[in-house]
Image (cartoon, rainbow, N blue to C red):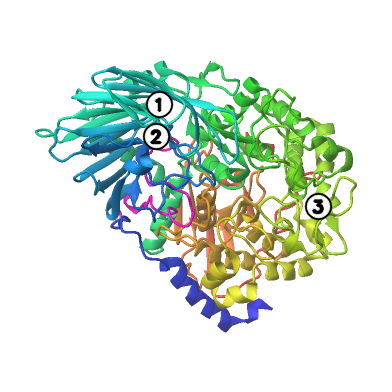
Amino acid sequence: MPWLRRTRLRTAGTVLAAALLGCALTAPAAQAAPPGGPLTDLVNPFIGTRNDGNTYPGAAVPFGMVQLSPDTGHYAGYGWDDDHIRGFSAVHLSGVGCGIGGDLPVLPTTGDITETDNAKYAAAYGHDDESARPGYYRVGLKSYGGITAELTATARTGKQRYTFPATDRANVLLDAGQSLHRMVSTRVEVLDSRTIRTTITGRGFCQDTEPYTVHTLTRFDRPFASYGTWDGDKVTAGSRDSTATGRHGAYARFDTRTDRTVEATTAISYVDAAGAAGNLRAEGGRSFDRTRAAADAAWEHRLALVRTQGGDQPLRRTFHSALYRSFLAPNIGSDADGRYTGWDQRVHRAEGFTYYQNWSLWDTYRTQAQLLALLAPGESRDMALSVLRIDKESGWLPKWGYGTVETNVMTGDPVTPFLTNAYQQGLLRGHEEEAYAALRKNADGVPPAGSPAVGREANAPYMRGGFVPYLKDHRPPKAGDSDFAQGASATLEYALSDAMLARMARDLGHGADADRYAARSRNYRNLFDGSTGFFRARDARGAFAGPADPAKSVGFHEGTSWQYQWLVPQDLPGVLELIGGKDKADARLDSFFAYPQLLADPARTARKVWVNGPYDYYNADKYNPQNEPDLIAPYTYLSTGRPWKTTDVVHAALTLFTDAPTGMTGNDDLGTMSAWMVLSSMGMFPVQPGTDTWGLSTPVFDRVDLALDRRYYPSGHFTVTAPGTSAADRYAQSVRLDGADHDRTYVTTGELRAARELSFTVGPKPSAWGTGPHAAPPPVAGPASRQRPADRR
């Protein structure tokens, strides 16, 4: 038994301490904050810019519409190993796996304009003259005689400051025709001697999606000396208005022989040119330095929602950098006047709330949605209302929305646990039945042919036969991914969503619906192959499809049967029963996590056994900590009665997060992986996404103080303590909630609202804590499921 291996546990603890608290060199731009100093000093925006973490280092404010950041040629924007910058563009998404955004890359140059392709006129730079912090980015460009570029932002504007050498030909190039995705058409207009306007229509995210349009307005702090436009290779001096479908842009020229600094403010709008102008008036009036200070203050306020004690500087930098990235999206979609473009491509107005967009729901429903519900419930409420607006205006709930369009990227039914989580966290007061009606329509139907949404594409066979048939290479008639092509994982995700909707239905008094969805939540059993002991895809005839080897399984989106077998958080007791009981399931988990190797060398196991590459999803029988299907898997040990193993696995996985550019485990996916790091470090994780259940594991800090919104958490504060926690002393000996013994391995949101402190007593070896018959989170659905209306009122 593992609790008898005392020598090995202590050895593993020593290795884990070194790995978790300082296993990577800090990036040159990372800053060390003195004790009690600003939390923004702890954030390194360069984390994840190498090895396809796909983050961006540029300037943004929390949830801002604008993310002004350098583009270096990497498909997602910025790549640490690149050495040229093509421009500083206004729109980015943190950690996406396909090219999107990059609208209006702006670059300062000098001399004659002889190139119009930004890959050719790109400026050289080096990390030795580059720095970033929340809301601010600076770089020294080595080309064009040496130009310093600085960036900062408000919610709807990006502000640039360029310091040129002394020259009469200092240029600012506004490239409307190139971006990180496919361009459809662009227009540039020189409105006056200080202002340039663009209209940019683009499309494409992983696949060819519906087009969207973004409007920009750039105002300079002084008049141009001259200006012009380009179309393809042709540059036309003095041109004021140009429309094109290819390489296209405008330039402004300045004389910097006496005044070397040029400032520009770019406002964007997804509505119209008037919206961009209104956003510029509302937010663009401050100086660069005042804007930078305001952005820094906004981030300090957000980061101060979580204060930590214990841990060394690398761990604290890694943690607060992950917290920073968790607040980057979703993004404000409505203009300063409240107008926004809905998914019906009509203009609407948000009254009483802020409209948000950019919905990476297949990713964020598992971690980031819960973290934001805890720390930013006001914004989370508006995000949920925005999703309901999409249903109201376009006729269907979203799956993966970018800007004003549905991309249908990824599979399953992620919007259901996203919205049921909002309901369970008390964020849909007054909108419960509206949300339920939209979710019921989504759960029982398929979008009409005229809708851009695919929804639960495979609902008909799923409801008829209890599973989504696997149809290899099936392509839906609309853009996006196909649930049929990933029939096995789609079945599991539909069933998960059915369970969460069943609980919401029962809470709201829709008993017949609740029973129906609860029955459907057990459809995961229809995939179980008793001869292999694993889930397998079924074809249209109902026969098992693909190889019997679970590591070579088919029909699982970005994963294998080994990884997806634990994605039944609604009924883990049922899954363990199918496998053969807790002991057999525990042995399978040990194999999955390479647990004996983990105890001997956790950091090496994490990097050499678990991780095979950011996009290497298949042919594996091991845990993949860098991809969404496995995010909850470490917490499965809570249900086998070995909660200390959850701590072992979680703490080993945390070694993958460092304060270096390589410090992300694959794509961040709009804060999904960062939120996993934050929540797991605090010792509270949403083990049943779509409910109000938080699984427990030992925190990595001695103390974590959460400042909470009193509208949702009456005390306004919650503290998690684990005095003396370390890699060696990482096992919970006991847990107390407001001083009372807490033998369960989970807490509910209602308990968090009623309490002020969750305290862990830790030691060097496992204990009996959390091993009782009722310690683990119970199943979600069914008439006997937990019902705590007081938790949500």
The residue that disc 3 covers is 537
Q: Quadrant of the C terminus?
A: top right
Residues tagged 2 and 1 counted as in contact (Cβ below 8 A): yes
Residue 55 among those drawn in magenta = yes
Distance between mark 2 and mark 1 Cα atoms: 8 Å
Q: Between 360 and 793, which is closer to the camera in this rendering? A: 360
Q: Residue at x 90, y 46 (%)?
A: 541
In the image, residue 350 above or below residue 627: above
Residue 302 is inside the magenta segment: no
Question: Callout 3 environment at 10 Å: few (<14), some (14 to 19), or many (20+)?
Answer: many
Q: Residue furthest front?
A: 234
Judging depth in this view, the residue of 564 and 190 nearest the camera is 190
What is the distance, in whole Å, between disc 3 and disc 2 at their CAs? 43 Å
Most common secondary structure along the magenta stretch: loop
Which amino acid type is shown beneath numbered disc 1?
Ile
Which circle's residue, 3 or 1, is located before the other in the chain?
1
Q: Which residues are magenta?
A: 36-64
